Amino acid sequence: MRNQGTSTSIGNLPIAVIGAGPVGMAAAAHLVQRGLRPIVFEAGAQIGAGVHSWGHVQLFSPWRYVVDAAARELLSETNWQEPDAQAYPTGTELIEQYLAPLAEHRALAPHIHTNTRVMAIARQGRDKMKDSGRANAAFVLHVEHSDGREEQVLAQAVIDASGTYTHPNPLGSSGLPALGERVLADRIYYGIPDVLERERLRYANKRVLVIGSGHSAFNALLDLASLAEQAPLTQITWAIRRTDLSQLYGGGENDGLVARGALGTRMQQLVQSGAIHMITGFAIERLERTTDGVVVSSATMSLPAVDEIIATTGSRPDLSILGELRLGLDPSVEAPITLAPLIDPNLHSCGSVPPHGVDQLSHPEPGLYIVGMKSYGRAPTFLMLTGYEQVRSVVAALAGDWVAARDVQLILPETGVCSTDRNSGCGSENGATACCSPATASVAAHNTIDLLPIASFDRGIGLVALQPIAVAEAANACCSSVVQASCCAPEEKADCCGSDTSGGCGCQ
Ligand SMILES: Cc1cc2nc3c(=O)[nH]c(=O)nc-3n(C[C@H](O)[C@H](O)[C@H](O)COP(=O)(O)OP(=O)(O)OC[C@H]3O[C@@H](n4cnc5c(N)ncnc54)[C@H](O)[C@@H]3O)c2cc1C
């Protein structure tokens, strides 16, 4: 796989793809289709190693939304049987029935290197400060094999599709690990554990605290609830930071993706049934190991001790491997500067995203593209279809076909127009503390193509009903039937709940 030496013309070098997840593999398929040579590095032992870590989870996108067009074309040359377009794969099925056969295609197989982690990338012979000849210098990738061997590989361009799943956000509400979080690592699972099978013993008949309010939390909680039916001493507590619960469960039957809507609906029913003890407005500061178990505290209250914590608090990109390259990233979202405002959950509570491609994904470092889940930085709203269009556009540009590169189109399930400018910020995750009167989400027509309501896998932002123009009465968090750990003062409660402060209008 090596392209050592300095005399090689940069145009003869392969194009490095970091990560053999759905988007990295789609990039490789597009490169091959364009007659370009990929070299794919996958840190894990298998194709789709990231997906493998949540392999037991069923996708909420059916097959028709998770197969890339170039990949399908390659696979159609083989004896591949395309799965039922309407069926919903699990992560494992996505690998077994799509990514693995794709990786075995003879046009791709020789170019894929599993067990090979990209440690760092630079411009050959030029550190970050050096301008001269930069654009024409090859990229040099430092890679490490699982047996410890190190190598340098040259590439003419780099497509970083390394995802974010391996870099979970910590539990601390400020974005830093909570006090005690590191030393309690043995009691915390970051992601969605397979509580019904692989990790069953760890959770059965235990006191389990789930943190986070996105679909990952839903998946973990629903599985825990099933486990509790078989192991009745299992106790489930769900703590979330937000106090505004109006969008917590998503669009229900209005959701363009039926399975995703159903997930929220089932979750809501579960909470209402009392099977889960829910705490809202809880911002974690500290974890302590006590004789009774792990005690998790905010600034003002501590939760009852638990045995296990499941952290479904989102993830963030690992920018360290790109440290020697010149990046144009938004300082908060950590997505490319022109993409960031299109996906920033502070601006888009219903998650619209316009088609975007090579122009939005370019950096001050020519030839470098961050795509896929990682292109969204810390924004929690990425879908595979978006990544497939990103790599189609980037690869077209690398092939010199700028017309195709700029003809970006994203055909996703329709939502109609949905772009919010929430005028109150009431009860948001961003720290609003006042009790709010029912807020009206003011909805403006967006001048972009609006797409399906995008799920937050982990932070629960960006769910919305699918009305063409969604002017939604936001439910009042303080009047909800769950106890608010931090919400409103009693006099404010009267404002928002009126005279009816019964029925669990539970500010503390
Ligand atoms: C539980 C869950 C359910 C989801 N369901 C859906 C859904 O239904 N529909 C949908 O459209 N999207 C869904 N997504 C969102 C998203 O589409 C997926 O996360 C998807 O896997 C992202 O693809 P990716 O290729 O960008 O990243 P990943 O799948 O994360 O792949 C990145 C790969 O890069 C590798 N890697 C990382 N660092 C390095 C390195 N330094 N060197 C070499 N290799 C490296 C990793 O091992 C990994 O295999 C879901 C996400 C989660 C977490």
Image (cartoon, helix red, strand yellow):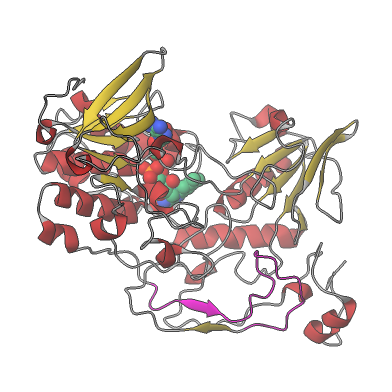
Q: Nearer the viewer, residue 328 or 143?
A: 328
Viewer-nearest residue: 353 or 255: 353
The image quadrant that residue 95 belongs to is top left
Q: Quick check: which quadrant has ligand 1?
A: top left
Asked if residue 373 is positioned above or below residue 466 in the image, the reply reads above
Q: Residue shown at 67%/75% (left/top)?
A: 426
Which residue occupies 40% across, 83% down? 445
Q: Is residue 208 left or right of residue 421?
A: right
Magenta stretch bounds? 415-439
Which quarter of the picture shows residue 491?
bottom right
Give the prevailing secondary structure in the magenta stretch.
loop
Check the image and report above or below for 59 versus 139: below
Quarter of the image with the N terminus is: top left
Of residues 140 and 115, the one drawn nearer to the viewer in this rendering? 140
Displayed quadrant of residue 407: bottom left
Q: Quadrant of the C terminus?
A: bottom right
Q: Is residue 429 magenta?
A: yes
Taking the spot 59% from the left edge, 63% from the top edge, the residue there is 265
The image position of residue 39, as x and y in percent, is 23, 30
